[in-house]
Amino acid sequence: MAKGQLSSDKKERRENEKIFKSINNNRLSIMFIIIAVAFVSGFLEAIKNDTPHTSGDASVSEPVKSDKKSNGDYEIILQNELPVSLSYADYMGGIKTTWSVTDLRYETTDYRYKKEQDVHFFFSGEKTYDIRGPGQGDSCRISWQLFDADGYVVDSGTCYSPNVREGEKFKDALSISYNLAPGTYYIELHSTN
């Protein structure tokens, strides 16, 4: 074999090694891209599964039912007729503030790892009176009770609006009922003392 042919074979082998290394590097890059895309997709799916999912307006006449879900469904029926006027009284029974609740809606979470879900109540309304005068700000306290279909109280709470003055409106003040089993419920709004 001639000397020129030997060095030509070495050059060809080196060229083939470079091509092989380049192909392997490209394969690794593609694998890393696939892994990154899979990770980001899984992360986005996890975020999606832990956000409030189903919503409805709580009303007396035509209650809105939530969509059927794998973990059941929820129906919440408001017992008060909106708008409803409520008040906050001191320990002697004197009215300190009054407000009107004009809207109530709810959303249920969609946690796939458990049957019970959290229900987020969103209250909107307007402050109508403050004993200290029209320029005084304070939160409106909306007390509520949640009853199951058999009439048992299963939860209660108080929603605090942002600080508002007479004539000012508030929107989507939040109150939460935790770990509520699927089913039909009735919510009543009350004054607070």
Image (tube, rainbow, N blue to C red):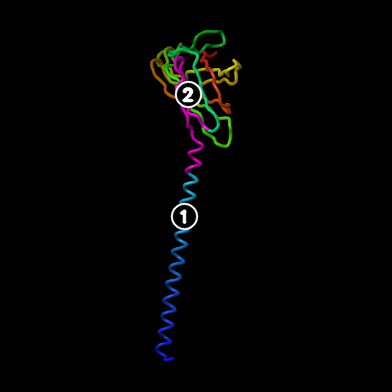
Instruction: Determine the secondary structure under disc 1.
Output: helix
Instruction: Determine the secondary structure under disc 2.
Output: loop
In the depicted structure, whether residue 27 falls above or below residue 131: below
Q: Magenta residues, as a range?
A: 44-69
Expressed as whole percent of the image width and height from the top left, the position of residue 21 reads: 45, 70
Q: Taking the image as drawn, is residue 162 in sight?
A: no
Q: Seen from this angle, which residue lies furthest top?
A: 93
Mark 2 Cα-neighbour bin, 10 Å: few <14, some 14–19, many ≥20: some
Query: Which residue type does callout 2 highlight?
Result: Lys
Quadrant for the N terminus in the image: bottom left
Instruction: Give whichever of discs 2 and 1 has the lower sequence position.
Output: 1
Residue at 42 percent across and 86 percent down: it is: 7
For residue 65, the mark is: 2
Mark 1 Cα-neighbour bin, 10 Å: few <14, some 14–19, many ≥20: few
Foreground residue among 74 and 122: 74
Of marks 2 and 1, the one in the foreground: 2
Which residue carries the number 1 mark?
34
Expressed as whole percent of the image width and height from the top left, the position of residue 180 reads: 57, 26
Expressed as whole percent of the image width and height from the top left, the position of residue 151 reads: 59, 15
In the depicted structure, whether residue 118 falls above or below residue 94: below
Query: Is residue 60 highlighted in magenta?
Result: yes
Quadrant for the C terminus in the image: top right
